[in-house]
Amino acid sequence: MDSMIRATGTELFQAEAALQSICHLKLEKKAAYHVAKLTRLVEQANHALQLRRNAYIKAHGVERDGQPGSSFEIAPDSAAWQPFQDWMREQVEAPIEIAWSPLTLEQLGEHAVSPADLNALGPFLAEPPTS
């Protein structure tokens, strides 16, 4: 399956928990592999976004409690807060491509899946064909 899923960072974050939930279903082997790989790719993309966020905070923030070696933060009342918010908005709204095809309802079989999980999948769930 050489398809491409186009999503935003926001959609990645929303889909990750739903995919992890679906990973607990007992699916047919090919469907299970598809879900597992898609989950892994979404987790990797989310992790990359988190690393960029952490690097930004370290570059533009201050050490928490002023202690060397502690974590960094950008306080809401600091001059760096609004630029950080603008930067984060750009990051989560930017298109991200996942080199895999979306799930289909057929792959989920007869398993009960919550409407909330289906909704959270967004572009990671293919629209069923209309008849």
Image (spheres, helix red, strand yellow):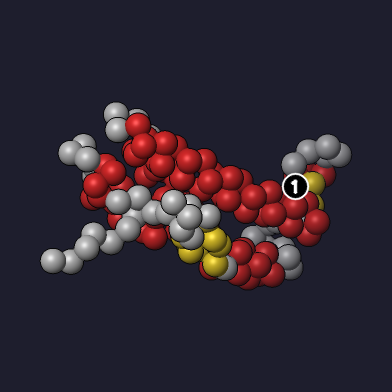
Residue 120 picture location, percent across and down: 35, 53
Q: Which residue is mark 1?
A: 72
Element at badge 1?
A: strand
Looking at the picture, tell me which residue is in the foreground, 121 or 32. 32
Looking at the picture, tell me which residue is in the foreground, 107 or 124. 107
Q: Amino acid at mark 1?
A: Phe
- In the rendered view, tell whether residue 83 sits above or below residue 60: below
Residue 14 shows in this picture: no
Q: Residue furthest right?
A: 68
Q: Would you identify the image quadrant in which residue 29 lies?
A: top left
At horizontal 48% and vertical 60% (from top left) the residue drawn is: 4
Q: Residue furthest front?
A: 1
Residue 10 picture location, percent across and down: 48, 59
Looking at the picture, tell me which residue is in the foreground, 80 or 45. 45
72 sits left or right of 107 in the view: right
At horizontal 18% and vertical 39% (from top left) the residue drawn is: 110
Q: Would you identify the image quadrant in which residue 97 lies?
A: bottom right
At horizontal 39% and vertical 60% (from top left) the residue drawn is: 123
Residue 87 picture location, percent across and down: 65, 67
Counting every numbered tag in the picture gives 1
At horizontal 54% and vertical 67% (from top left) the residue drawn is: 95
101 sits left or right of 87 in the view: left
- In the rendered view, tell whether residue 41 sits above or below residue 32: below
Which part of the image, by quadrant, shows the C terminus?
bottom left
71 sits left or right of 28 in the view: right
